[in-house]
Image (cartoon, coloured by chain):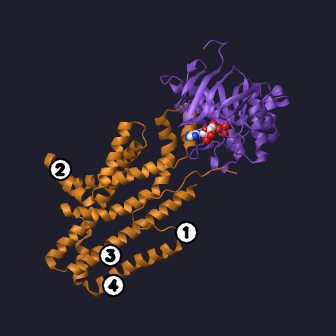
Chain colours: A orange, B purple
Amino acid sequence: MKQDTTPYKPIDVGDGAAIPHRSDAGLFTAWRIAFFGALAVSLYLVLSKPDPYLAIFKFVPDGILVTFKVTIGSILLAIVIGLIAGLGRISTNRFINGAASLYVEVIRGIPLLVQIFYIYYALGRFVKIPDIYSAIIAMAVCYGAYMGEVFRAGIQSIPKGQMEAALSLGMSRSQAMRQVILPQAFKVVLPPIGNEFIALLKDSSLVSIIAVADLLRRGREYASETFSYFETYTVIGLIYLILTLFFSKLISMMEERLNDGR
Amino acid sequence: MADNCPMIEVSGVSKFFGSFQALDDVSFNVADGEKVVIIGPSGSGKSTILRSINRLETIDRGRIVVHGMDVSNPKTDISKVREEVGMVFQSFNLFPHKTVLENLTLAQTVVRKRSQKEAEEIAMELLHKVNISEKANAYPAKLSGGQQQRVAIARSLAMNPKAILFDEPTSALDPEMIGEVLDVMKNLAREGMTMVVVTHEMGFAREVGDRVIFMDHGKIVEEGTPEHFFTNPTHERAQLFLNQIL
Ligand SMILES: Nc1ncnc2c1ncn2[C@@H]1O[C@H](COP(=O)(O)OP(=O)(O)O)[C@@H](O)[C@H]1O
Ligand SMILES: [Mg+2]
């Protein structure tokens, strides 16, 4: 009996933090220990040594806000770029396909840090835009390439019969893509997009190199003024850890709700 | 497009997958209202010829004309052909993210440009016809195989096709569900629908078919009325096949 009612195959494109799943007991326990441990350590440091820990915790929230802005701006733009790149990668038009593949190969072959520098200075030669926008564009151009592969895999995971059924009803290829394939593919790509979001949250620390006052940059400023390097980077690390663990949990909860939906 | 033209005209069609020849000089016509049954062993090219008729596969040689439209000409707007020729698949291929009703209204609104209201009325009427109106708001995953295939037939009918191609519509079904799908197809046949049916259901072929086409290795080996085919097939391979399956 090959009556395939749930045609979604899981796709595996992950380079983010481990996102815990309900069924993965080991990972779930590790998540709890890490998350509540990080909170407890933070609290302990602030209470036991308010100088400098309380001061550091008070100094960095501006940076957290900037880190959020960069991360959210980049992920949204990267999703748009990724969708275009993913559609390009499965296009039968040789020019479009070639351009999309070239983009993906080139971007994936250059370190993100180099891209951030390059786009920042390249953009700076032609237009004057705030540093944070250069940062978001650089991150999105880079992550768009990975996201493109996620979308390509997601679209290709939808059984061929779906496209054929839509075509045989008289729909055009683009109508079928929009009405039948993409709505199903979006459900498939949500988990890997969650992974990309976590990876992006961490990689956003790289933008501190181009004068964007994100979390890491604020930490560096504080440390260079007070020379308390060890204490500052302890706090910065703890905050990144708490943030990524928090969001990975949030994402896994969202996924579960989505799956329970039907 | 004159009335005496065949609905489907297949002449001298060959098709290669790489160096493998899946179809070898296949020719047959289907008249308006005719029911043609294609049988043959697995891998003999039955699906390929069916899928060539609405250009899900492109052919390498020969000509296919559907209702006056030349499918084998790359310039022909294939959507126009597909609007007129429905297809029912072995694996149903319902859209899992849409309800049964939405499965039936989607192409009506997008392709036929009907209003949502009109499309829903037509859809409900057809769901009644295939006996599954109570599932209109269910998602396909909640339906049995037989129910899904009946919905798929209704979805195809919603476009008011001039002909429907069936590719082993009951092969993926549990035995107890085959009957309900065949009943729907028999009703359609009685109403005069032009049908090309690939099937292993020999009872159906005998009862409904005007003509039986037997294929083997990409060729039409034998063609004739069901009586002729089932009582005294001339070719040895057709005899062997019948002995195996009956
Ligand atoms: N997309 C394809 N690529 C390569 N070979 C194919 C493809 N589709 C069908 N074939 C081959 O063509 C032959 C005929 O296939 P098909 O028409 O599906 O046979 P049937 O429907 O009679 O079982 C088979 O040998 C099959 O392996
Ligand atoms: Mg077949």
Q: How far from the left and from the top, in percent, is residue A95?
A: 35, 37
- Please give the name of the residue rendered at 73% of the width and 26% of the height, measured from the top-left corner: B35
Q: CA distance from mark 1 to mark 2?
A: 47 Å
> In the displayed structure, does residue A80 sit left or right of residue B205?
left
Q: CA distance from mark 4 to mark 3?
A: 12 Å
As drawn, the residue found furthest toward the bottom would be A48
Mark 1–mark 4 CB contact (< 8 Å): no
**What kind of residue is marked 3?**
Leu
Q: Is residue B97 above or below residue B240?
A: below
State the image coordinates of residue B25 (x, y, percent, origin top left). 62, 26
**In the depicted view, which residue is nearer to us: A118 or B42?**
B42
Q: Are marks 4 and 3 on the same chain?
A: yes
**What is the crowding at mark 3: few (fewer than 14 residues within 10 Å), some, or many (at least 20)?**
some
Q: Which residue is mark 2?
A: A122
**Of A168 and B212, which appears nearest the observer?**
B212
Chain ID at mark 4: A
**Which SS class for mark 4?**
helix
Identity, as a three-letter code, of the amino acid under mark 4: Tyr
Front-most of A240 and B40? B40
- Tell me the CA gap for discs 2 and 4: 45 Å
Q: Earlier in the sequence, mark 3 or mark 1?
A: 1
Mark closer to the observer (2, 3): 2
- Disc 1 residue type (three-letter): Ser
Of mark 4 and mark 3, the one earlier in the sequence is: 4
Q: In the rendered image, is residue A244 in sight?
A: yes
Chain identity of mark 1 = A
Give the residue number, with chain letter if any, for mark 4. Answer: A44
Residue located beneath label 3 in the image: A238
